[in-house]
């Protein structure tokens, strides 16, 4: 059984088409990165999965039921943007309240350990830093041992170590069968973690696949090295090279196929220093997409 099934989902807010004819299926234990520029429709999609917004047309099934049912509230965990609306409650009290909502919740001690909030358990929410609030929000999302976890910009404000702990735990949840959808503008984190990418552009799903598949579509690899040889004349006539630059002895060459390129230069390669071959990063791909390149 698919965990999530979207059939031709469209969401309109008056003249704004926030989601346009989106169809897709997500299976158990996928870790899906939902990305796209501001206003692309990511949060709208999450809100419809939660039943907080109704689809304008199309249909959503989650574990074979419609979004927003009491049954789903038991098995879906969520971190929305700015979701800690109760400000004058202590960390421990809100966790205890959430703990009582579920049939087999995690122990409070365990949630405080995962979120690294043990030292703040007697503080009020409005006394927490931005990153601590995101960690508390994560604690509330996972306390019920959800089968589906929806994370909308979860790491905003988290410091580097807490971010690492967060992603380590998210990966662990995925490996034990949790299905996870995460939106973020920190594309390096998505590239490192998600095993499927969904790219939204003005409400439309423009890509659905793995990072490697996306990189293959872009068909560009960067080769970086230092050489004392003068290679410019050869590079200028090389059909495989999209672009190249030189700063002193440092060459940066963008090629369509790095295997072909390496074969062509195999005689010179032993003299190259610090040779690095890099696939185009997700950040660069998204930047180029937004710039319309
Ligand atoms: N309640 C609403 N009423 C009217 N328009 C809305 C509403 N919620 C969202 N929109 C519009 O729908 C579009 C998609 O918004 P959404 O919040 O889904 O984008 P997003 O991809 O999550 O953006 P961000 O990266 O900035 O969080 C935007 O144009 C936004 O202005």
Image: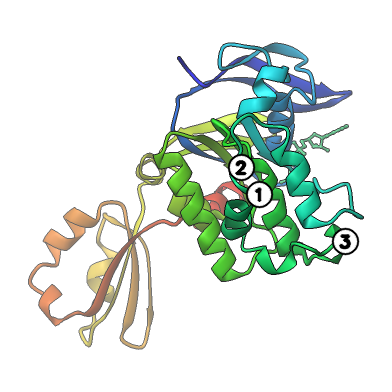
Mark 3 → mark 1, Cα distance in angstroms: 16 Å
Above or below residue 67? Residue 16 is below
> Residue at 66% across / 49% down in the picture?
139
Q: Report x, y in % for residue 169.
A: 49, 52
Whether residue 283 is visible, yes or no, is no
188 left or right, relative to 269: right
Answer with mark 2 or mark 3, whichever residue precedes in sequence. Answer: 3
- Quarter of the figure that contains the N terminus: top left
Name the residue tied to disc 3.
126
Ligand 1: quadrant of the figure: top right
Q: Secondary structure at mark 2?
A: helix
Q: Secondary structure at mark 1?
A: helix
Answer with mark 3 or mark 1, whichever residue precedes in sequence. Answer: 3
Mark 2 → mark 3, Cα distance in angstroms: 21 Å
Q: Quadrant of residue 49?
A: top right
Q: Quadrant of residue 176?
A: top left
Above or below residue 292? Residue 163 is below
Name the residue tied to disc 2.
142
Foreground: 38 or 108? 108
Name the residue tied to disc 1.
139
| Res. 34 mark | none
Q: Report x, y in % for residue 249.
A: 31, 86
181 left or right, relative to 20: left
What colour scheme governs how the chains and residues are painted in the rendered image of this protein? rainbow
Mark 1 → mark 2, Cα distance in angstroms: 5 Å
Q: Are marks 1 and 2 in contact (CB under 8 Å)?
A: yes
């Amino acid at each position: 059984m698919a965990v999530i099934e979207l059939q031709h989902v469209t969401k309109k807010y008056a003249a704004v088409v926030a989601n346009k004819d989106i169809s897709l299926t997500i299976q158990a234990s996928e870790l899906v990165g939902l990305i796209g520029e501001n206003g692309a429709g990511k949060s709208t999609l999450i809100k419809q999965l939660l039943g907080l917004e109704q689809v304008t047309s199309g249909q959503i099934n989650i574990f074979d039921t419609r979004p927003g049912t009491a049954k789903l509230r038991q098995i879906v965990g969520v971190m929305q943007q700015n979701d800690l609306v109760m400000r004058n409650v202590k960390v421990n009290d809100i966790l205890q309240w959430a703990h009582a909502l579920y049939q087999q919740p995690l122990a409070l001690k365990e949630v405080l350990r995962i979120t690294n909030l043990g030292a703040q358990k007697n503080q009020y929410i409005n006394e927490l830093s931005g990153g601590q609030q995101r960690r508390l929000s994560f604690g509330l999302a996972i306390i019920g041992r959800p089968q589906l976890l929806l994370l909308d910009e979860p790491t905003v404000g988290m410091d580097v170590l807490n971010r690492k702990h967060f992603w380590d735990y998210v990966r662990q949840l995925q490996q034990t069968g949790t299905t996870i959808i995460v939106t973020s503008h920190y594309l390096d984190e998505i590239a490192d973690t998600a095993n499927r990418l969904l790219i939204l552009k003005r409400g439309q799903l423009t890509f659905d696949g793995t990072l490697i598949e996306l990189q293959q579509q872009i068909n560009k690899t960067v080769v970086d090295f230092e050489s004392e040889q003068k290679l410019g004349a050869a590079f200028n006539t090389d059909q495989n090279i999209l672009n190249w630059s030189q700063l002193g002895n440092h060459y940066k060459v963008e090629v369509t196929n790095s295997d072909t390129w390496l074969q062509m230069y195999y005689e010179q390669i032993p003299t190259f220093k610090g040779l690095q071959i890099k696939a185009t990063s997700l950040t660069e791909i998204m930047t180029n997409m937004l710039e319309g390149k």
